[in-house]
Every structure is written in C-alpha cells, then in structure tokens.
Image (cartoon, rainbow, N blue to C red):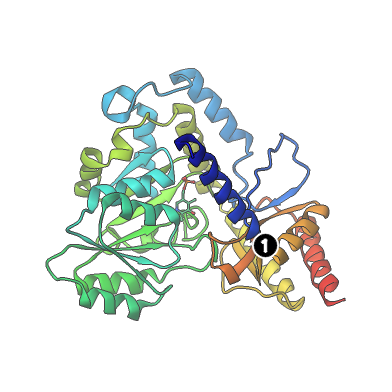
Amino acid sequence: MSRAHRWDERLSQAAAQRRAADGWRQRISLGPSAQLIDFAGNDYLGLAADPRLAEAQAAGAKRLGAGARASHLVSGHLDVHQRLEERLAELTGRPRALLFSTGYMANLGVLQALCDRHTRVFQDRLNHASLLDGARLAEAPSRRFHHRDLADLERLLERAPREAPALVVSDGVFSMDGDTADIAGLANICQRQGAWLMIDDAHGLGVLGELGDGCVGQAHDHHQVPVLVGTLGKALGSAGAFVAGDAAVIDHLIQFARPYIYTTAQPPGVAAATLAALDILEAEPERRDRLHANIARFRREADTLGLPLSDSGTPIQPVVLGDSSRVLRWAERLAQAGLRVGAIRAPTVARDQARLRITLSAAHDASALDALLEALDGCRREEAA
Ligand SMILES: *Cc1c(COP(=O)(O)O)cnc(C)c1O
C-alpha cells in the first residue's frame, strides 16, 4: 500500500468510528434571519446582535483599520486594546489585564508560560478542553481531581512533591453542566498548600457577580485567585479573551506566552465593540435581572413537567438524557418546533451522559420560553406513549 493511501484510510476510519457512535458533528450555516430561536449559544445578555456593538465595531474599523496589522509586541498594540485591558482589569478588580484573540489561546498561553516539566498542574475532571490542551503544550505533569471534589484535590496536592510549584485549575462555571466551582474552597486549599489558583470564568463573566464581574471578580482578589481568565465572545457578545492578575503575572505572559506573542493582535473594531458591551453591562443591570428571571422560570416549570434538571443556577441548563440517539431525537423534535438546542455527545461528555444543552438569555421573551417548555413536554409525552 502506498504511503499516500494510508492517509485516505486514516481519515475514513476515523469518520466511520465517529458515525457509528452517533457522534458525527454537523455545522449549520445561518443567515441573518435564522428562523430558529437559539437556545444553544452563549449570548447570555443578548448583546451579540445589539446595534450599539455593531456601530462601535464599524467606528473602530473606520478609525483604526479593519486589521491590527501586526502582533502586540511588534506594532499591533493600539490605544483601543490598551483601554480595553484597563477596563477589564477594573471590572475584575485586578491590577492588570492582558488581551488575547480567543479564550482557547488565553488558556494555552497561560499554562504554557507558567508551567513546564518542573511544575505540577491539578485540574477539575470536567475542565474545558483548552485547559487540558494548555497543560499538554507546557509538558507539565497533570492530575485531574474528581469534579468539584475539594478533598480529592487536597489529597493529590498532599502527595505531590513539595519542591514543585503547583497550579490548581478550574472552570468557574462548567460549560456542559452549568454548575459552579467553589472558589472560596479552592482558594483555601491553595493557600494551605502553597499552590496558585487559576479560574477560567468564560461563562460567569457578565452573568454572575454583583456587577456582572463573574464568579471570581471583585469578590475574590488576586491573592486568592492569582490567575483569572475571562472570555469576551459569550455574555459580552463580542470576541476575544483576557487574563487578569498582578503585574508580575501579566509581564511574565507578555514575555513568555507564545500564543500571545506569535499572533496578530485582535482587529481594533472588535476591541471597540467589547468596550461598548462593557458600557452596556454597567448601564443596564436589568439585562442580568431578566436573564436570572428566565433561569428561575425555566427551572420551576421544567421541574413541574418532570424533566431531569441538573444542579445549575446559571444560564446553562443541561437536560441529561443518557444515550446519544435519544439526544438527537429530542433535538430534532425541538428543531421542528423552531428551537435550536445543543446536542452534546461523547467525546465532549462521557458516553452515557449525552444531553441537551439548553442555554438561556436575557434576549428570550416569555413566548420563547413557552415554546421551549411546551416542546420539551412534547418530547417527554411522545416517549411515554
Ligand atoms: C468557550 C470557552 C473557552 C474558549 O473561549 P473562546 O474565546 O471561544 O476561544 C475557554 N474556556 C471555557 C470554559 C469556555 O467555555
């Protein structure tokens, strides 16, 4: 067999395996007037389509150009990036913040820059893929502790070599489950064990906290949580991410984080749109109130219908159905009712934990929630029949 032919074989084998497991993923390309009501995205405050963000983005592009032209360390670091970093540091109550192009890159960058073979990384079992990949990029020996299990974490820290710097890493809000990390509990253990704590608050920023400052934010300072990651493409409706911490951490990342150094800076219009989103976050707290009212209503009524709810007080409301064909059936029926939800299967979650990932937003009105609850009830009745 020729060498080139082996590539064909590799690809077709991988495809066949994935299809056999009901795991084949399909992209749907959406036009400007997509007819389905979206219960799958992460636009928790309804900012992604806000005309004020689009206008700020257009104005930023007109003033500074469509692209940033270079990386931050060459000539791509523009005043709009600088202002955005200052606002993000202020929002999260940290001395400094550093902008990245995506959350995936921020997590790779932090772990690669802070860690190496001589450090130890401890991750919650359900952490986001980018955190796991970051530790691999760093070639840092890693252990995973049971989900939200502080005792298991402490046991692993006790056993690890004392001379190796230790970094404990957790999602703030877990992206497939919607439950939250016990930040105070993690910070306590880290303090006792002399470890640093890194929290990825991708789904908490804009949603949780008194000011929308997330599940860490101003409630837990940078001594408790030295490394805080937030993303800007979810509740803030824009794109990009940041790391917030003290000057030593941020300067270290600027010097050593390869996913920061070797990439073109974010387009200036995008940074301008995020600044507009931060203004709205501050001026319109009623968006967070509306979101939390939607979450409360959904949980109350879904519970009355007997749907299997998870222990989540966040916009992420998974309905765990078990096997992936059942999940696809329910998602299809919801789509017929004009509703889009996430159909989450292995390998994103464990094989027997396939689920609908329903996300709520301040943009959903009462009739959208009516339609969702009615369609879910329809799925349940159909199965019972
Ligand atoms: C979405 C997400 C990321 C990645 O952020 P992007 O900006 O989309 O690359 C990182 N961590 C968590 C927990 C996320 O949910």
Q: Is residue 60 above or below residue 222?
A: above
Instruction: Say which quarter of the image contains residue 171.
Output: bottom left
Q: How many marks?
A: 1
Residue at screen point 60% across, 55% down: 18
* Furthest residue toward front: 1
In the rendered structure, the answer to whether residue 362 lies left or right of residue 336 reads left
Q: Where does label 1 land, which residue?
A: 294
In the rendered structure, the answer to whether residue 294 lies left or right of residue 125 reads right
Instruction: Say which quarter of the image contains residue 77.
Output: top left
Relative depth, front residue between 167 and 117: 117
* Furthest residue toward right: 385
Residue 132 location (% of width, % of height)? 38, 57
Residue 173 appears anywhere in the view: yes
Residue 64 location (% of width, % of height)? 43, 20
Question: Please, what is the three-letter code of the amino acid marked with disc 1?
Answer: Asn
* Secondary structure at numbered mark 1: helix
